[in-house]
Image: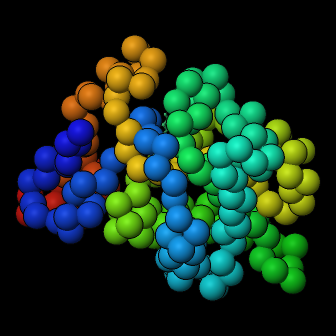
Amino acid sequence: MNKEAKTKFEINPLLKQRWSPRAFSDKTVKKAQLQRLFEAARWSPSGMNEQPWRFIVGFKGDDTYHNIYESLVEFNRLWARFAPVLVVSLGKKVYTGKEEINPSYNYDVGQAVAHLTFQAMQEGLYIHQMGGFDPAQIVARFSVPAKYKPETVIAVGYPGESYMLHPNLKKLETAERERKNFNEIVFTGKFGEPLDIF
Ligand SMILES: Cc1cc2nc3c(=O)[nH]c(=O)nc-3n(C[C@H](O)[C@H](O)[C@H](O)COP(=O)(O)O)c2cc1C
């Protein structure tokens, strides 16, 4: 399915092609591909080079996958079961060696996942991030220490066919992708004053 971004300006083709599918094919994700995905995440920048990101990786059929899947809200269970790999991203809330909160830990984890996403596209893989899960279940099922916060669950795989999906999801899968205009997000002078280059 072509869900390419309808950009006003030319951007990197991988970023243009990226989207978040809910239908995944049963094609296996190779170990070497995952190595590269997490290598990309590992080299992401972070505040004070704290590298607060952590990942728990489950492969369809194993206990880790089952435990991640069980933490998902009903809506996400409808489709995430197609993904061959499910990953939990977690953030370390405090700086190492101090009890002080790291104010950029969420930001840094998100950026590492963005790097992982870009590498996934390079591999022909797509990812779909989810905030719809129960973090308490992740903490309990994986004995996550208190200093860490489960951030998202990430489905990884090759895109599948939309007919696989529940009828309500099929509509979402084929819907037009939407974005805010530049004047709502890029400012100059004062907050809210659009930068006049678009
Ligand atoms: C932090 C985060 C949480 C998300 N949570 C969910 C979710 O629980 N379920 C879902 O189906 N999609 C979820 N999404 C996917 C977004 O809905 C999707 O990225 C957005 O609609 C833009 O679509 P695109 O990624 O195809 O451009 C989430 C995305 C992010 C980044």
| Quarter of the image where the N terminus is located | top left
Q: Quadrant of residue 98?
A: bottom right
When the figure is inspected, residue 17 is found, relative to residue 162, above or below; the finding is: below
Can residue 30 be seen in the rendering of this structure? yes
Residue 177 lies, in percent from the top left, at 25, 37
Find the residue positioned furthest to the front.
27
| Quarter of the image where the C terminus is located | bottom left
Q: Nearer the viewer, residue 90 or 189?
A: 90
Residue at (76% x, 55% y) in the render:
149
Residue at (14% x, 47% y) in the render:
6
Q: Nearer the viewer, residue 90 or 98?
A: 90
Q: Quadrant of residue 130?
A: top right
Residue 27 lies, in percent from the top left, at 46, 49
> How many numbered callouts?
0
Residue 121 lies, in percent from the top left, at 36, 62
When the figure is inspected, residue 65 is found, relative to residue 110, above or below; the finding is: above
Residue at (16% x, 60% y) in the render:
195
Q: Quadrant of residue 14?
A: bottom left
Q: Is residue 164 left or right of residue 61?
A: left
Residue at (68% x, 58% y) in the render:
57
Q: Is residue 99 left or right of residue 85?
A: right
